[in-house]
Amino acid sequence: MKRYVVYTCFVMALIWACRKSGDNKPPAGPTPYTVTLPAHFPQPVYDLTQNPPTVEGIALGRRLFYDPRLSRDSTISCGFCHQQFAAFAHFDHALSHGIDNRNGFRSVPSLFNLLWQKDFMWDGGVNHLDIQPLTPITDANEMGEDLGRLIARLNADKKYRSMFDGAFGPGEINSQKLFRALSQFMATMNSFNSKYDSVLTHKAQFTPDEQAGYAIFQAKCASCHKEPLFTDGSFRNNGLPYNEFLNDAGRMRITNSTGDYLKFRVPSLRNIIKSPPYMHDGRFYDIYDVFEHYSSGIEQTPTIDPIVKNGIPLSQEEQRQLYFFLTTLTDYTFINNKSLSEILIDN
């Protein structure tokens, strides 16, 4: 009898264990997120399969983007310099503005359509989206933080530990997870819903002035500002007078080639009306000053780009019509997108 009872208990325990095992569902992983890519754009440069966006990863990246504690003195966030209403450029500063009231020596580039970008910064000093944030976070004139110290701070924060676990699974927070979360958020910062896009997809029509401006753009600007991204991603000397105060040699600082002297990345013209000041040093606050530069202000230097060497004459009427066309590149859906807006970091 005793033997029978022991045997029965063993069988019941085995059945319970099997049932319990069957009830154990694997822990839910991050929720996949599909980034919307416009049909009229080329294939992205960034490989999303190497860092698949998730709902949790994007939410984490957004929090990091707007958290001033990523800077050394907890005063400057990424979002401080990259303002959404200005297409994530810095509307009211000619030069980047960092901790301790320091200034960098270049203007803040706008942030959008980064999936299609091969090089970053005005001189192309960074060549991958996943490592792009390293420069502003550690630059003494911007956020000025030590990466190791920042990682330790994140690991000591319960909220961040929980969010990183949700986005990447349990484990220590490291720099790879930090940068991948920021990339996932930045991968959603895409601008392709301007009036220009609506015209291109036959959902709207240009006004006569916009259409005339488009023709001027195609004849005089499109060689460098290629549609639909409105940049060819190249580095060019566009004839700006040398800025002796900043002593900036442009891409030559990266390549050490005198052939790259005073060459800077061609910026996109999307959202250009919303993202002054213009040029690598923010010297122009008015788009008409930019028109005048190309029309009559070109300075001849050994690396001047052949396209602008002889200037690009623009009459007053052409400038007016070109302005109207450039306004069609403003993407109000993008600059008002609530999923990209600043969030309050409450702890």
Image: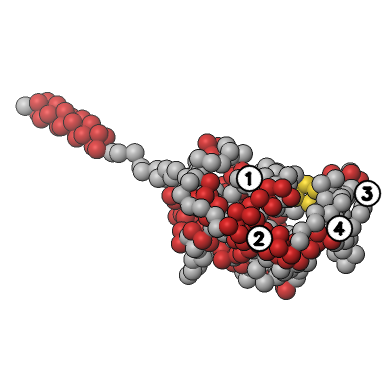
- Res. 17 image quadrant: top left
Q: Is residue 95 visible?
A: no
Mark 3 or 2: the one toward you: 2
- Mark 4 or 2, nearer chain start: 4
User: Mark 3 Cα within 10 Å, few/some/many (few <14, many 20+)?
Assistant: few
- Mark 4 or 1, nearer chain start: 1
Q: Is residue 338 visible?
A: yes
Amino acid type, callout 3: Pro
Q: CA distance from mark 1 to mark 2?
A: 18 Å
Q: CA distance from mark 4 to mark 2?
A: 22 Å
Q: CA distance from mark 3 to mark 1?
A: 28 Å
Q: CA distance from mark 3 to mark 2?
A: 32 Å
* Label of residue 302 in the image: 3
Element class at badge 3 = loop
The picture places residue 50, in percent across and down from the top left corner, at 55, 37
- Which residue bears the numbered disc 2? 321
Mark 3 or 1: the one toward you: 1
Residue at horizontal 30 percent and vertical 39 percent from the top: 25
Q: Residue pushed farthest bottom?
A: 101
The picture places residue 193, in percent across and down from the top left corner, at 51, 53
* Label of residue 282 in the image: none
- Which residue bears the numbered disc 1? 227
- Mark 3 or 1, nearer chain start: 1
